[in-house]
Image (cartoon, rainbow, N blue to C red):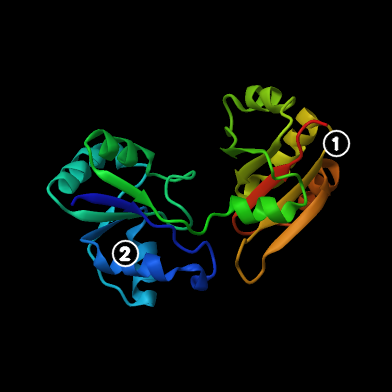
Amino acid sequence: MPRLILVPTPIGNLEDMTLRAKRVLDECDGVIAEDTRVTGKLMQLIGIKKPLIPFHAHNEHGMVGQLTQRLLNGERLVLVSDAGTPAISDPGFLLVREAIKAGVEVECLPGPTAFVPALVASGLPCDRFVFEGFLPVKKGRKTRLDELATEERTMVFYESPHRIARTLRDLSEAFGVERRASVGREISKLHEEHVRGTLAELHAHFSEKEAKGEIVVCVAGKP
């Protein structure tokens, strides 16, 4: 039976690779990968060899039709991103949508994703939260922040290390310098770090200290 299976991959620690994920990768006909070099290295480490199919932001529109047809032809394909759960701020949504429309069975394995451990470790309320992914870099950035200024749920953002100081400054201006927040960095890796405080304190900290690695920012909702 044709099936598309989304398999989360480790975001840092190779031990986060589940036994089920390894089995699914070993049984599939091919692996759709965001970066075949990254996935190839992972596959080598876990001792599995499968055909790798490049699928990324620059070719996903052109590849969706081809991949859907392969699934309809009976292939069992796995979709992975470079790290974490596919389609969370990574390519994948378009293929999932088209596969479902074509009647292909779609399955997603539970597994690593950066924002959940960052949120739980933040100390902020996590019974209700909103995941915002990456803020717009230029156009629409201020508008989005103004819209979120009255959000009462904890907000979760992804950010790159070279923009973190600017983003904390923008969040301070939009939400107020006393709003509580947490910055999680290098989740599940050797140098994992969580810095907690007000937006003003976090902005001061990351203005003085160069950040490295993938970053998750959690901000308390409006009191």
On screen, residue 12 versus residue 22, left or right, reads: right
Q: Nearer the viewer, residue 119 or 40?
A: 119
User: Vertical placement of 164 versus 177: above or below?
Assistant: below
Q: Residue reaching furthest right? A: 178
Give the image location of residue 159, x and y in percent: 61, 46
Q: Residue at x 20, y 50 (%)?
A: 2
Quadrant in the rendering for residue 13: bottom right
Count residues near mark 1 (Cα–Cα under 10 Å), then give few for <14, some for 14-19, many for 20+: some
The quarter of the image holding the C terminus is top right
Q: Residue at x 51, y 59 (%)?
A: 112
- Total numbered circles: 2
**Considering the numbered disc 1 on the image, is that residue within a helix, a strand or a loop?**
loop
State whether residue 92 appears in this view: yes
Residue, disc 2: 24
Q: CA distance from mark 2 to mark 1?
A: 47 Å
On screen, residue 114 versus residue 72, left or right, reads: right
In this view, the mark in front (2 or 1): 2
Q: Nearer the viewer, residue 159 or 219?
A: 219
Q: Residue at x 69, y 53 (%)?
A: 120
State whether residue 161 appears in this view: no
Q: Amino acid at mark 2?
A: Val
Give the image location of residue 127, x and y in percent: 69, 43
Q: Amino acid at mark 1?
A: Val
Count residues near mark 2 (Cα–Cα under 10 Å), then give few for <14, some for 14-19, many for 20+: some
Q: Nearer the viewer, residue 206 or 30?
A: 30
Residue, disc 1: 177
User: Vertical placement of 27 versus 146: above or below?
Assistant: below
Q: Which mark is residue 106?
A: none
Give the image location of residue 30, x and y in percent: 23, 59
Give the image location of residue 10, x and y in percent: 49, 64
Q: Residue at x 39, y 63 (%)?
A: 38
